Amino acid sequence: MSRDRFRSISWNIHLSDPEEDVENEKKKGTPGYDKLFKLRPLCDEILNACQTYYHPRKELSVDERMVATKAKTGMTQYMKNKPTKWGITLFVLAESSSGYTIRFSIYTGRAYTPSEHGLSYDVVMDLIKPSYLGTGYHIYMDNFYTTPKLFTALASLKFGACGTYRECRKGFPRERGNALTKKSDKGSVRWIREGSLLFVKWMDSREVSVCSTIHPAYSGETVKRRVKDGDGCWAVKDVPVPTPIKAYNKNMGGVDLSDQLIQYYSTHRKVGNWNRTVLLHFLDIATTNSYIMHREMSKTKQEQPMTHKDFMVELGCQLCGVDKAGVSQRRKADHIPVPIVTAEATATDASLKSPKSRKRCQHCLQVDKKRSDTQWKCQACNVALCVLVDRNCFFEWHK
């Protein structure tokens, strides 16, 4: 298929009924308007597939994911601490160990009827979906989501929770009697328990605060850190680390791992229509989850899984209905002109590279019996040859 043919088809992709799209547009500005109406059929199919064909392990993580776009929609956001700073935000629930995307929701802006609990509470409660997951899972999250109200609600549903927190937020203890200071030694620990909630503070390079409903404060774990000894010299030593912080560092990276796998062979391209951008991301979620399932099934069968690249090639061939062996490989050109770079040129200023890196054209010297200097040579033959508009010795030499 040619490039233009592919573009022609992609420009005319529709996932919903155009007549229903018109009816939805009439509701713009009202609570009944759905910003994702054109994507809703595929979005629901992907969500259903993610939950149908794989049951996750115990440790899960919740985090945001950015789908890169600067389209002028009410959903585009800027997050300065994310690698992708501009884009549409997805809230994602992923398996910590594999990065499998279990559920996701797209942030479409402030709701017309906001919940009294707040956005972070609503996001987590929507993602965990007890009717699908059941109970007994441990959910890890960062300080955007962690609140005593959310953790108490999760505990009532028989979900464990662990996450960093912001001390200034409502509901967290304000005990200052035995607080950590900037001069506290690395490995210093302070903790307090209120009902099922455990609040832990630990001094690393800076103070780290974690809340948990599933861990003890300390179980004897240590980590290696550079600390000053009595003589003021730096040395690597084992310092104590609280159990919740050790578990958080181990299990919080599920969504980041998923993002990493998606980026390896992403279908994302810069396009003018944000709907197509999100559509391509749905395809990335589907293909990445498929690869993770292939890898997990191979472990169960004690077989060697395909590499990510080989899996994507095999998947593409099966979807296109072609034989992998019959796919033509692009022939690598042997005789191509490349710039001449001499030792003298590379040892001097880069601006002198062009005039210093010239040799006599062999075609002009042998055929035309004249001297002509050129910057170009054949990569295969290592012969200097002219490549000019009015004199193409490279073509004549290889003819």
Image (cartoon, rainbow, N blue to C red):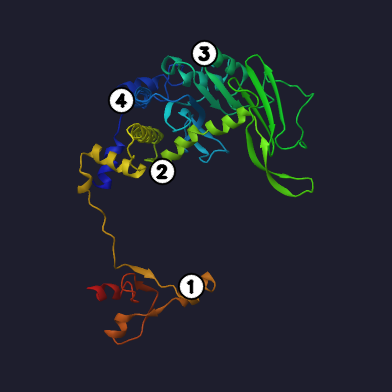
SS assignment at label 2: helix
SS assignment at label 3: loop
In the rendered image, which quarter contains the C terminus? bottom left
Numbered disc in front, either 3 or 4: 3
Does label 1 or label 3 sit earlier along the sequence? 3
Q: Which residue is mark 1?
A: 353
Q: Which residue is mark 4?
A: 18
Does label 3 or label 4 sit earlier along the sequence? 4
Residue 188 in sight in this render: yes
Percent across and percent down for residue 314 are 28, 41
Q: Amino acid at mark 2?
A: Tyr
Q: Disc 4 and disc 1: Cα gap in Å?
A: 59 Å
Q: Disc 2 and disc 3: Cα gap in Å?
A: 37 Å
Left-right relation of 110 to 208: left
Q: Which residue is mark 2?
A: 264
Numbered disc in front, either 1 or 2: 2
Q: Disc 1 and disc 2: Cα gap in Å?
A: 36 Å
Disc 3 and disc 4 in contact, CB within 8 angstroms: no
Left-right relation of 41 to 319: right
Residue 115 in sight in this render: no
Q: Disc 4 and disc 2: Cα gap in Å?
A: 34 Å
Q: Disc 1 and disc 3: Cα gap in Å?
A: 70 Å
Q: Disc 3 and disc 4: Cα gap in Å?
A: 41 Å
